[in-house]
Image: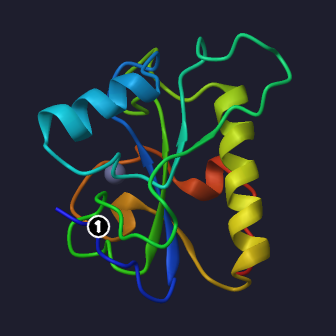
Amino acid sequence: MPMTPIGPIKALIVHHTATARGVGYNGIYQIHVEENGWSDIGYHYFVPGPDYDLFPDAKPFLYCRPFDRMGAHAKGHNRGTLALAIAGDNTVEGRGWTPRQIQAGQRVIDAFQLLYPGLPVLGHREVADTLCPGVDLRDVFVLGGG
Ligand SMILES: [Zn+2]
């Protein structure tokens, strides 16, 4: 199935993967493409778990779905929203985001806010009945605007 154009960008939505923190790109690909049958990973940006990078200075986030294609991450809110997912589960002890993962997520958020000044950065739970991403974004990230 071809991917749908994303339409005008309205917001960035942040997720945790609700998996073990060690999940990497291949693990997400396995779930989204091979198990769910989607055409690509549903997120636009992905921060893998803490064991992913071999090099301490590597930029620890990945681009997944093309930015001009609608993601598959927040039912009813996929049109016009870019998705950032960070590996782990903030609702489970020992599976929460590490400082390095948060730093990587902040880089994505900073880039989004530079490219789309004034547009909101929202946790998934702000638009849907879910615990995801298990934290208040304002407790974790530096967010611009109000
Ligand atoms: Zn989510």
Residues 132 and 138: in front is: 132
> Residue placed at 69% from the left, 31% from the top?
60
Q: Position of residue 35 (x, y in %)?
A: 13, 33
Q: Residues within 10 Å of mark 1 (few under 14, many from 20)?
A: some
Judged left or right of residue 60, residue 47 is left
The quarter holding residue 130 reads bottom left
Q: Residue at horizontal 52%, vertical 76%? A: 11
Q: How is the image coloured?
A: rainbow
Please state which amino acid type lies under the numbered disc 1: Met
Q: Please state the horizontal and vertical placement of residue 111, each as a whole percent of the image.
A: 75, 63
User: How many numbered tags mark residues here?
Assistant: 1
The answer to whether residue 101 is left or right of residue 130 is: right
Q: Is mark 1 within 8 Å of ligand 1?
A: no
The image quadrant where one finds the N terminus is bottom left
Residue extending farthest right = 57
Q: Residue at x 79, y 14 (%)?
A: 55
Quadrant of the drawing holding the C terminus? bottom right
| Camera-nearest residue between 56 and 66 | 66
Q: Quadrant of residue 78?
A: bottom left
Q: Is residue 107 left or right of residue 123?
A: right
Give 139 or 14, whichever is nearer the viewer.
14
Query: Which of 146 and 61 lies nearest the eye of the viewer?
Result: 61
Please tell me whether residue 107 is drawn above or below residue 125 in the rendered image.
Answer: above
Q: Quadrant of residue 88?
A: top left
Give me the residue at 23% from left, 39% from top.
33
Give the x, y percent position of residue 24: 46, 23
Indicate the position of residue 39 as horizontal and vertical percent values.
Answer: 25, 51
Q: Which residue is mark 1?
A: 3
Helix, strand or loop under label 1: loop
